[in-house]
Image (cartoon, rainbow, N blue to C red):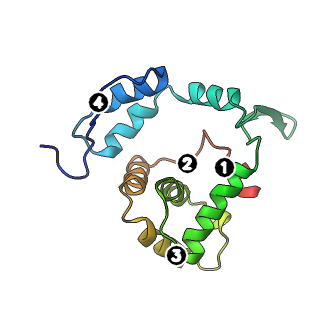
Amino acid sequence: MIQPGRVLVRGTMPTGDALVDTALHRVRTHQGAEPSTVIGPLSKGTRTAVLERLTGSGIVRVSNRTVLGLFPVRSWPLVLPWHAARAKLAVQATVEHGSSPDTETAMLISLLLAGGVLHKVRPTTDRRAQTVRVQQLVQDNWIALATRKALQDRGAVVAGLVDLPGFIGS
């Protein structure tokens, strides 16, 4: 019997997708563990493959530039801004109107909270009140809670797969 709040893999059939099957195997090896234990091994070595898929499918594009004319920087901005606009509308509905978030929105809000950038997506004069309100709205979503706890437990910073500055600034 696995304790509540612990990782439980219900399906063991391969999906036929190498990236997903590798992730499933990694999660299966941590059966019964806390979600924060699974996050690190789950993401190990996947960044390049995920970015290649997103680029290949036309969701993001590779952008190479230099900062101050010296430091090379590579980013992956969104190709179609409606992805970010749709996500921002969902965050706005939750933060400003108290709508119950779907799983994806709750997880996004948890990532924004953990990264300390929610106020940049939804500006406010009272960040503390905004954080408390949003935490209450997503508290019933186990994925959002597990994501936030795992990031906090590891002292992680939200970065990498999504061009967060592009999302925030657009």
**Looking at the image, which residue is at 38% across and 65% down?**
139
Residue 170, percent from left and from top: 77, 56
**Percent position of residue 4, x then y:** 21, 52
CA separation in Å, label 4 and label 1: 30 Å
Q: Is residue 154 above or below residue 122?
A: above
Q: Earlier in the sequence, mark 4 or mark 2?
A: 4
In the visual, does 149 lie left or right of 2? Answer: right
Residue for badge 2: 158
Extreme-left residue of the structure: 1
Residues tagged 2 and 3 counted as in contact (Cβ below 8 A):
no
What is the x, y in percent for residue 12? 29, 27
CB atoms at circles 4 and 3 under 8 Å apart? Answer: no
Q: Earlier in the sequence, mark 1 or mark 3?
A: 3
Give the numbered dot on residue 98.
3
- Say what secondary structure mark 3 lies in: loop
Mark 1 is on which residue type?
Answer: Leu
Q: Which residue is mark 4?
A: 28
Check disc 2 and report its element: helix, strand or loop: loop
